[in-house]
Image: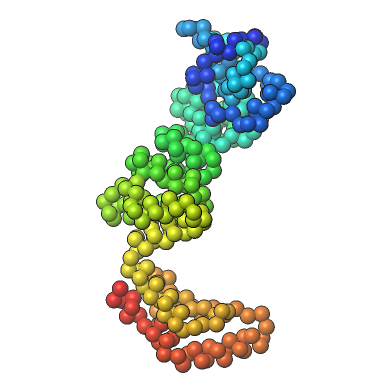
Amino acid sequence: MQAETRLIFLDKIDTRDNLYQISDPDPPEDLSDSIGEAGLISLPWVQQREADKVFRVVAGFRRITVCRKLGWPQLTCRVLPADAPKLSGWKIAIADNAVTRPLNLLEQARAAAGLMDVCDGDAKRAAQLAGPLGLRINPELIGKLTRLLALPGAVHQAVAQNRMSLNIALNLEMMDESSAVAFAGLCQNLKPTVNHQQEIFTGLYELARLQDKSPADVLARSDFSEILHASRTDRRRQLQALRRRLYNLRFPNLSRSEAAFEQKKKNLSLPENMNISAPPGFESNVYTLTVRFSQSRQLCDCAEKLAVICRKPELEDLLDRSFNENS
């Protein structure tokens, strides 16, 4: 494809035309420092609109934004012919972005959506076109990325910043918009792991259904609000408190049984290297005894202590299931 290089006044470039935009609009500080110090090394691509003769950006949104902030009146650009097909524009936009850095999931989603548009929704064809451009996506991922774009902007940013996994984001399709935004904010602030994201999502969604409320309304409760807005509390403690509160509200009987068991175990005064665990969910009568030791004499010592524990009435009290059955 032939493309000319021209000096173009910045007031003739419309950065609000986001037809080919892949990257986030806000440029990183190091880009501003680089252009200010060394100039524009990689030229942006633009295309003149036939209707008003103004130029839209094909590739280089952030570079052009930086040049504007630096007070440049004009800059040299590569110009895509006005009659060039959209596929040509998308190839340039994707390659220009993907060759310099890995694209985050939101950027991949925008690129995939552009290819899907010019491929009339053919995900297999879009994936074939993406590969040589430096974007390794398959049809299944394209489907997920397309769904991501239909979610609120707050979810986009949480995914782009790796604060929320793609699969968790897609689960938010089950929630109303305000709840999806609230969950995205939670992930941005508390930075839960993927496993914790799934746990919190499931707990919040099921609790909302039990209470016939939206997840956003549940999070607005005073007990959750106090946890989420405790500015002086360590983030990990906030996360732990949130998970515990969700668990207690979802499983009130089980929570009370667990609390009673822990209190009775405390009364047993077990050695530090010994522990008794209740059966999961108290669904059986099989308990687990754990003993930690490194030498044979330590094991023998544990055996002696265990013999004493077995004669304690507190042990029978611990194994009494009535506290669970009556909870």
Judging depth in this view, the residue of 19 and 257 nearest the camera is: 257
Residue furthest left as drawn = 212
Residue 57 occupies quadrant: top right
Q: Is residue 103 visible?
A: yes
Image point 42% across, 77% down: which residue?
263
User: On the rendered structure, is 271 left or right of 76?
Assistant: left
Image point 55% across, 10% down: which residue?
12
In this rendering, the count of numbered labels is: 0
Residue 245 appears at what percent x and percent y?
39, 60
Judging depth in this view, the residue of 235 and 202 nearest the camera is: 235
218 shown above or below 279: above
On-image quarter of the C terminus: bottom left
Residue 25 appears at what percent x and percent y?
54, 27
Image point 43% across, 86% down: which residue?
315
Judging depth in this view, the residue of 59 and 10 nearest the camera is: 10
On-image quarter of the N terminus: top right
User: On the rendered structure, is 271 left or right of 169?
Assistant: right
Q: Is residue 148 visible?
A: no
96 shown above or below 267: above
Residue furthest front as drawn = 232
Residue 185 appears at what percent x and percent y?
44, 44
Residue furthest right as drawn = 38
| Colouring mode (rainbow / by chain / secondary structure / one colour) | rainbow
Image point 61% across, 28% down: which residue?
97
User: On the rendered structure, is 115 left or right of 243?
Assistant: right
306 shown above or below 193: below
